Image (cartoon, rainbow, N blue to C red):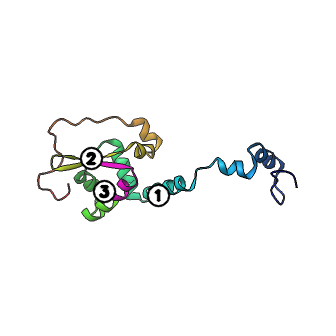
């Protein structure tokens, strides 16, 4: 058997390309390692839920507080909290305290997972100082 040949019959063009890339070892060396693959898998799992995907898309338009996200999504506080935590744990969103509210925004990694059409439209939204999106004392902060 020739060097870098795969047992069995494979198309000649595939065999030639495989040999050019260093055989099986060369092929395997060009793909991400196990840790990177696990991390990417977790991100894909986080984005596989339609609610979390919608949250990412909302935050792709502008940073938002929980009460606005809750209003758009229409789920209970506890469920929204769960989904926000999944996105935070996977580095897709971050929350910043602003007075009584937490304002969520996409991280750079989260922005990378927006649909291409949203990336092209994304504009920075600046809030006016003191603009408050929730009623004080609202349970959804």
Which residue carries the number 1 mark?
Answer: 42
SS at circle 2: strand
Q: Residue at x 15, y 50 (%)?
A: 100
The residue segment tinted magenta is 85-95
Q: Residue at x 84, y 50 (%)?
A: 3
SS at circle 3: helix
Q: Out of 98 and 130, give the one closest to the viewer.
A: 98
Measured in 3D between alpha carbons, the distance from the residue under mark 3 to the one under mark 1, in whole angstroms, is 23 Å
In the drawing, does residue 45 fall left or right of residue 83?
right
Q: Position of residue 102 (x, y in %)?
A: 23, 50
Q: From this view, report whether residue 82 is shown above or below residue 134.
A: below
As drawn, the label of residue 64 is: 2
Q: Residue at x 58, y 50 (%)?
A: 32
Q: How many marks?
A: 3
Which of the two marks, 1 or 2, is nearer to us in this view?
1
Q: Is residue 90 magenta?
A: yes
Near mark 3 (Cα within 10 A), the count class, few <14, some 14-19 or many ≥20, is some
Q: Is residue 5 magenta?
A: no
Which of the two marks, 3 or 1, is nearer to us in this view?
1
The N terminus lies in which quarter of the figure? bottom right
Q: Position of residue 77 (x, y in %)?
A: 25, 62
Which residue carries the number 3 mark?
Answer: 73
Near mark 1 (Cα within 10 A), the count class, few <14, some 14-19 or many ≥20, is some
Q: Residue at x 18, y 35 (%)?
A: 128
Q: Position of residue 48 (x, y in %)?
A: 45, 58
Q: Out of 22 and 90, give the one closest to the viewer.
A: 22
Q: Earlier in the sequence, mark 3 or mark 1?
A: 1
Which of the two marks, 3 or 2, is nearer to us in this view?
2
Measured in 3D between alpha carbons, the distance from the residue under mark 3 to the one under mark 2, in whole angstroms, is 13 Å
The C terminus lies in which quarter of the figure? bottom left
In the drawing, does residue 49 fall left or right of residue 4?
left
Q: Earlier in the sequence, mark 1 or mark 2?
A: 1
């Amino acid at each position: 058997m020739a060097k870098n040949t795969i047992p069995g019959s494979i198309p000649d063009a595939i065999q030639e390309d495989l040999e050019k890339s260093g055989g099986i070892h060369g092929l395997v060396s060009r793909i991400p390692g196990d840790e990177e693959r696990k991390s990417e898998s977790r991100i894909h799992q986080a984005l596989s839920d339609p609610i979390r995907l919608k949250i990412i898309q909302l935050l792709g338009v502008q940073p938002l507080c929980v009460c606005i996200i809750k209003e758009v999504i229409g789920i209970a506080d506890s469920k929204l909290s769960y989904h926000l935590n999944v996105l935070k744990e996977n580095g897709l969103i971050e929350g910043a305290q602003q007075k009584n509210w937490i304002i969520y925004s996409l991280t750079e990694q989260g922005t990378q997972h927006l649909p291409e059409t949203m990336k092209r439209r994304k504009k920075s939204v600046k809030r006016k100082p003191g603009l408050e999106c929730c009623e004080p004392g609202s349970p959804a902060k």
